[in-house]
Amino acid sequence: MVYKALTVAGSDSGGGAGIQADLKTFQELRVFGMSALTAVTAQNTLGVQGVYPLPPDAVAQQMESVGTDLGADAVKTGMLFSAEIIEAVAAKVRQFGWDRLVVDPVMIAKGGAPLLQEEAVSALKTYLLPLAMVATPNIPEAEALTGLKIQSIEDRKEAAKRLHELGVKHVVIKGGHDDDGEETVDILYDGSEFFYFTSKRIKTKHTHGTGCTFSAAIAAELAKGKTVQEAVQTAKSFIQAAIEHELGIGHGHGPTNHWAYRDKQTR
Ligand SMILES: Nc1ncnc2c1ncn2[C@@H]1O[C@H](COP(=O)(O)OP(=O)(O)O)[C@@H](O)[C@H]1O
Ligand SMILES: Cc1ncc(COP(=O)(O)O)c(N)n1
């Protein structure tokens, strides 16, 4: 059986985040990867040097090409840049009935460069999040989407509930940015229960692309027909291995190691 996943995201020339992270992750998890590019970024481990968005029609056409021929068992979105691109993407998701949809609401690169225009946040809430089977905001993104200030686990649970009310079926609020403590905790809310995915916090500056990789791993597992809980568990193990076995390349915040999880399985 060949499982297929489509990523709708931006290109990271440095290869650690965006489309490149997504396709590498799909491949590592034995899922055939396809892509619809939303923007080209000139980017490396030191930061984002340029952002060149594509016309919304070009994004829609790539999705149309995939949808009318190959089809997709799961879809994920990353950097979408503008309200116009978000509306175009949501329309195609509806047209093809892509219900195994993971929305990673990418807003700001780790170095501070904006990857989503500020006025596009409401488009994300209106058009795309209601279609999501899973959404994976980090703490700053959950704050921007809900208007809440998130400090405690209780605050994160409240934010998850608010996002569920927008129509997101499963909300994962990631804990990478909560840098107190010895652990990272990702919280999953399915509308009735909370589930916790905990791992040892790794002390490293090489976390470029962690969010992209994590959400791509969820999409890959959903493509195989796994449940959301199973998919999040595998994604958490995948990203833990990728951070733990850092590659140490570039002069700034380096990428994670996308082959570490497979190495661990086959060792
Ligand atoms: N230092 C770390 N050690 C272990 N896991 C981490 C670390 N930083 C992030 N993660 C994990 O990586 C994933 C992405 O989290 P996060 O960094 O919050 O997202 P983003 O890249 O969108 O900002 C989550 O599963 C989180 O728990
Ligand atoms: C094209 C692109 N998309 C997304 C991110 C976010 O990366 P991160 O996973 O580190 O938040 C990025 N830096 N570049």
Image: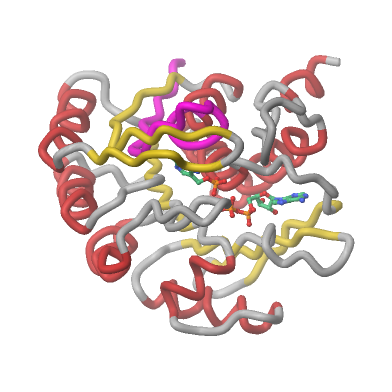
Residue 99 sits above or below residue 160 on the image: above
Query: 98 left or right of 48?
Result: left
Q: Which of 27 and 71 is in front in this view?
A: 27
Query: 239 left or right of 124?
Result: right
Looking at the picture, how far across and down is residue 239, in whole percent? 69, 40
Whether residue 5 is in magenta: the answer is yes
Looking at the picture, how far across and down is residue 82, in whole percent? 24, 54
Could you say which quadrant of the image residue 169 lies in? bottom left
Find the residue positioned furthest to the left.
57
Identify the residue at image location x=33%, y=38%: 8
Q: Quadrant of the C terminus?
A: top right
Whether residue 116 is in magenta: the answer is no
Query: 118 left or right of 171?
Result: left
Residue 88 sits above or below residue 140 on the image: above
Residue 10 sits above or below residue 104 on the image: above
Query: 24 left or right of 236?
Result: left
Could you say which quadrant of the image residue 166 lies in? bottom left
Q: What stretch is highlighted in magenta?
A: 1-20
Identify the residue at image location x=67%, y=38%: 252
Looking at the picture, how far across and down is residue 4, in whole percent? 40, 24
Q: Which of 209 and 113 is in front in this view?
A: 113
